[in-house]
Amino acid sequence: MTGTRLAGKTAAITGGASGIGLATARRFLDEGARVVIGDYNEAAIARALDLLDAGDRITALRIDVAEEHDIERLMQAALGQWGGLDIMFNNAGITGALGPITEIEADHWDQSFAVMARGVFLGIKHAARAMIPNGGGTIVNTASIAGLAGGVIPTVYSAAKAAVISLTRNAANELAQHRIRVNAICPGIIFTPLMHSGREAEALETARQVQPWPDAGTPEHVAASVLYLASDEAGFVTGEAHVVDGGYLANGLLRVHPLPGGKANPDYAGMHYGLTGQPREIRRLPQTTDQRQ
Ligand code: NAI
């Protein structure tokens, strides 16, 4: 342990087995918190528990954030083991539906929103139910700069992240009376497997073109801001969409993004389930006149 900013607090983190969620779990543990991770990917959970090596201050379970019962189980794990929940980090995400809007399947829209919007709604709902009897708490939701500006693709991902920001503002309004702060974090290009999909060099090159700050964004950059929002230092901050993007949004150049599916005129469509372990369903589209040129 290196600090005491979260000493005695209990935190739940969805998507906590990888990337931003994992870095945040490490940071929370370092600051004295007890952490319960909920993630879809069982192998990643096992690896995360090994890496974090936090003894009886950590527990984890396999959940699907889109399933209400699973979110309830996550809350029960925190309440049963540690008697309360102080911090909820609704962070699980996937790339979701890909392709031009004319080709996106309605089922893929629903599946994307199930994880990235419904999952956050359920996390807020049940975290608030757990926090209200204990006199309050704090909720952080992972959105994205994609939810704040047009021109960021994939389209469905951006729409789901905009929903997270709207949900955050409304929940902050409603839950303030219970002393529950609700904020969103909006990362830019953060080097995680979800973002570069194994094509790190390509992603780094794109980041150089659009992001003013010279360093690459890391999960630790985001975790530091989540820690701030979750801690008492942010005691008067609620309803905020906090950007962590090395100046990408300030630069205004939002036409290119290295996310898988982030091509302006994609020649494929389908569904990318992120790092959940579920196989992708991507199909090639017939070439259009534009793409042949
Ligand atoms: P990641 O893929 O490394 O981690 C996401 C985790 O969420 C994975 O462990 C995955 O198994 C889990 N997950 C996915 N669907 C789930 C479900 N239905 N139920 C439970 N767990 C589920 O990705 P990363 O990059 O750490 O992303 C974390 C969040 O940050 C996501 O919401 C993502 O959209 C967001 N974000 C990431 C950016 C980036 O550049 N990496 C930029 C902006 C936002």
Image (cartoon, rainbow, N blue to C red):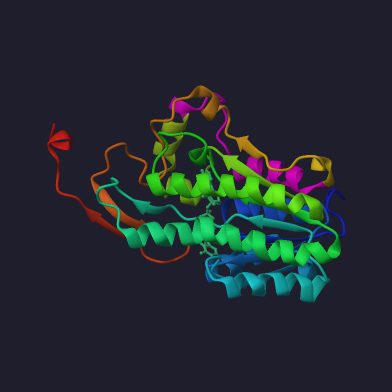
Looking at the rendered structure, the number of numbered marks drawn on it comes to 0
The correct choice, above or below, for 31 with respect to 253 in the image is below
Residue 187 position, x and y percent, is: 57, 40
Prevailing secondary structure of the magenta residues: helix
146 vs 127, left or right, is left
Residue 254 position, x and y percent, is: 43, 30
The correct choice, above or below, for 4 with respect to 279 in the image is above
Q: Name the foreground residue: 162 vs 81.
A: 162
The residue sitting at 39% across, 33% down in the picture is: 256
Magenta span of residues = 208-231
Evaluate whether residue 282 shows in this view.
Answer: yes
Q: Name the foreground residue: 104 vs 221.
A: 104
The correct choice, above or below, for 47 with respect to 215 in the image is below
Residue 238 position, x and y percent, is: 73, 43
Based on the picture, tell me whether residue 204 belongs to the magenta stretch.
no
277 vs 120, left or right, is left
The residue sitting at 66% across, 62% down in the picture is: 125
Residue 290 position, x and y percent, is: 16, 34
Based on the picture, tell me whether residue 222 belongs to the magenta stretch.
yes
The residue sitting at 80% across, 52% down in the picture is: 177
Q: Name the foreground residue: 21 vs 128.
A: 128
Which picture quadrant has residue 83? bottom right
Which picture quadrant has residue 123? bottom right
